[in-house]
Amino acid sequence: MAKRRIRVTLLFAALACLAGVSLAQRFRMEQEEAPRPFFPANGEFHFIRVEYTDLPQFHRRFGFASRGAQGEGWWIVDWPDADDHFSLGVQRLTRIDTGEPRHFRLTDSRLLDHPWIYATQTGWWGLTNAETTALGEYLRRGGFLVVDDFWGPEQWEIFRATMQRVLPDRPIEDIGLSDTVMHVLYDIEQKDLTFIPGTRHLRRWGGEIVVQQPPGTAPAWRSISDDRGRMVVAVNFNTDVGDAWEYADSPIYPEAMTALAYRYGVNYLVYAMTH
């Protein structure tokens, strides 16, 4: 009987894994049907995704069947759909003149022309000295960095230690509900400090999509400020804002989570462009 229970348990675990894979494939197939949207070549805001060096033990090569996209490194996760969909949201929800999304190396001097940049999977980055120097200069000169989609104590420690190299002696603190960034356009309240799932956290159950938060994780919304008290880094930890943007056009992804992700992102952007 014990062996039989073990076999049944393993069978259900395998079926759960297959269901997760099937759902992820469904999302990818839905994305492949639509071409990339058109954006003007120039604008006062461009979604800037930063390319960075991975820690060697975590480096990955990514290839996407759609649109001929290829790339190396964790920086490319959710590209280009997250960038495109958030940019479309900025066009619709604000009066900000929005141009085409772009991506640059951290050491690219063109980064200094843009007030807002985004980096994903920062629990696995391994920035070189040149990259930490360039990022520190960007932030001290008025730039704003959003980091997203990294999880657990190991990845947190990698991120924390890296930011100590970028901005020595600047603490990472929780964003208070009364902070300006939480109300600069949309009011973000206590109920909004919630887990935003990636597609890997969604499962089909009884004809519905159920969110499964990873065990032992709690979403955290944190920040780093400069010597004058201006927020220069917004930290989305144990949550996946990028996936909510990426799948904004999917009828499967929870609409409420996409709406919340847009409120966070637009608030970060308006804060960056007005402070």
Image (cartoon, helix red, strand yellow):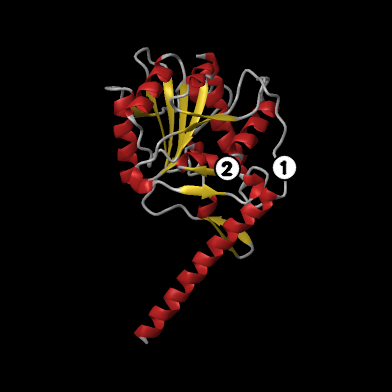
Q: Amino acid at mark 2?
A: Ala
Please indicate whether residue 225 sits to the left or right of residue 14 in the image. Answer: left
Q: Report helix, strand or loop for mark 1.
A: loop
Residue 257: quadrant of the picture? top right
Residue in the picture at 53% in, 66% down = 18
Residue 244, label in figure: 2
Residue 21: % across, % down = 54, 61
Residue in the picture at 64% in, 42% down = 248
Residue 76: % across, % down = 51, 41
Residues packed near mark 1 inside 10 Å, few (<14), some (14 to 19) or many (20 plus): few
Of the two numbered discs 1 and 2 on the same chain, state the one appearing first in sequence.
1
Residues packed near mark 2 inside 10 Å, few (<14), some (14 to 19) or many (20 plus): many
Residue 77 seen by the camera: no
Q: Nearer the viewer, residue 60 or 208?
A: 60
Please indicate whether residue 98 sits to the left or right of residue 120 in the image. Answer: right
Residue in the picture at 51% in, 70% down = 15
Q: Amino acid at mark 1?
A: Pro
Q: Is residue 206 above or below residue 165?
A: below
Q: Quadrant of the N terminus?
A: bottom left
Residue 128 seen by the camera: yes
The residue that mark 1 highlights is 35
Q: Report helix, strand or loop for mark 2.
A: helix
Residue 236: % across, % down = 45, 36
Q: Is residue 7 above or below residue 216?
A: below
Please indicate whether residue 113 sits to the left or right of residue 138 in the image. Answer: right
Q: Residue furthest left?
A: 169
Q: Is residue 66 above or below residue 160?
A: below
Estimate the spatial distance between the alpha carbons at disc 1 and disc 2, rounded to whole Å: 19 Å
